[in-house]
Amino acid sequence: MVVKILDINSVTRDVKRFTVEKPKGFKFTPGQATKVSINKPDWLDKKRPFTFTSLNSDPNLEFIIKGYPLREYPNHTGVTEAIHKLEKGDELIIDEPWGTINYNGKGVFIAGGAGITPFVAIFRQLVKDGGIYGNKLLFSNKTQKDIILEKELKKSFSEKDLVLTLTRKEVGGYENGRIDEKFLQKHVDNFSQNFYICGPKVMVGDLKETLSSLDASIDSIVFEQ
């Protein structure tokens, strides 16, 4: 399905919000993603998965995408760098939605950097439905400038249910350090609940092991696959 880009906005220094046309009858569940490619000859077959950050009830689709320039990330493919160079009126090609993160009830969300994006639509739907209370978010970023949708998250969660941690700078009002066993023991008082994890593969793998060692049930840990 070919969709036109309607608007592009900067979210952080290397993250952009893309608002695109929504095909007639297109439906998805918060947490789902789709394969996206650029509708230009050299990029048609270079499909990459991106999560919808809009709600199913919204008139348009929204994607929040971090750019990975090849000069800084030589192991990447250049797709996000090319997407970041697109302009309003350019076109993307999207597939049918497919599941990534399924919301199974209240719990603790753990995100690293752009790993927050699969959770955005879930949070927005919970806020809309009045069901965000009782969920908690632990969100790790390098610096304060890297925090995606910080203002929105602070409006969505109560102060006690939103923990922002920075790994490269110590800043007042923020935790400092990675989300490890000590961090989890400090901020989670019940490991018999749902856990949702999304971030770099190493982070997700380490956290799955750590949560299991803290007696969290493997069946209660939801992660992007």
Image (tube, grey):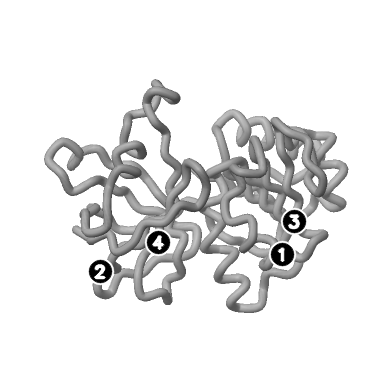
Q: Nearer the viewer, mark 1 or mark 2?
A: 1
> Mark 1 = which residue?
157
Amino acid at circle 3: Leu
> Mark 2 = which residue?
23
Q: Are marks 3 and 2 in contact (CB under 8 Å)?
A: no
Q: Are marks 4 and 1 in contact (CB under 8 Å)?
A: no
Residue 60 found in image quarter:
bottom left
Number of other residues with Cα within 10 Å of mark 4, as a class: few under 14, some 14 to 19, many 20 or more: many
Q: CA distance from mark 4 to mark 1?
A: 22 Å
Amino acid at circle 4: Glu
Q: Which residue is rendered at x = 67% and y = 37% of the image?
A: 208
Q: Circle 3 sits in a helix, a strand or a loop, which is it? A: strand
Q: Circle 2 sits in a helix, a strand or a loop, which is it? A: loop
Inspect this view and state whether residue 121 appears: yes
Amino acid at circle 2: Pro
Amino acid at circle 1: Phe
> Mark 4 = which residue?
62
Inspect this view and state whether residue 215 appears: no
Q: Is residue 7 left or right of residue 15?
A: left
Q: Is residue 216 left or right of residue 83?
A: right
Q: Circle 4 sits in a helix, a strand or a loop, which is it? A: strand
Which numbered circle lies on residue 26? Answer: none
Give the percent coordinates (x, y) of residue 104. Answer: 61, 61
Q: Are marks 2 and 4 in contact (CB under 8 Å)?
A: no
Q: Which residue is rendered at x = 47% and y = 41% of the image?
A: 14
Q: Considering only order in the chain, which callout, 4 or 3, is on the residue closer to the N terminus? A: 4
Q: Which residue is rendered at x = 74% and y = 70% of the image?
A: 133
In the picture, the quarter occupied by the N terminus is: bottom left
Q: Considering only order in the chain, which callout, 4 or 2, is on the residue closer to the N terminus? A: 2
> Mark 3 = which residue?
162
User: Which residue occupies the foreground of this view, 47 or 11?
Assistant: 11
Q: Considering only order in the chain, which callout, 1 or 3, is on the residue closer to the N terminus? A: 1
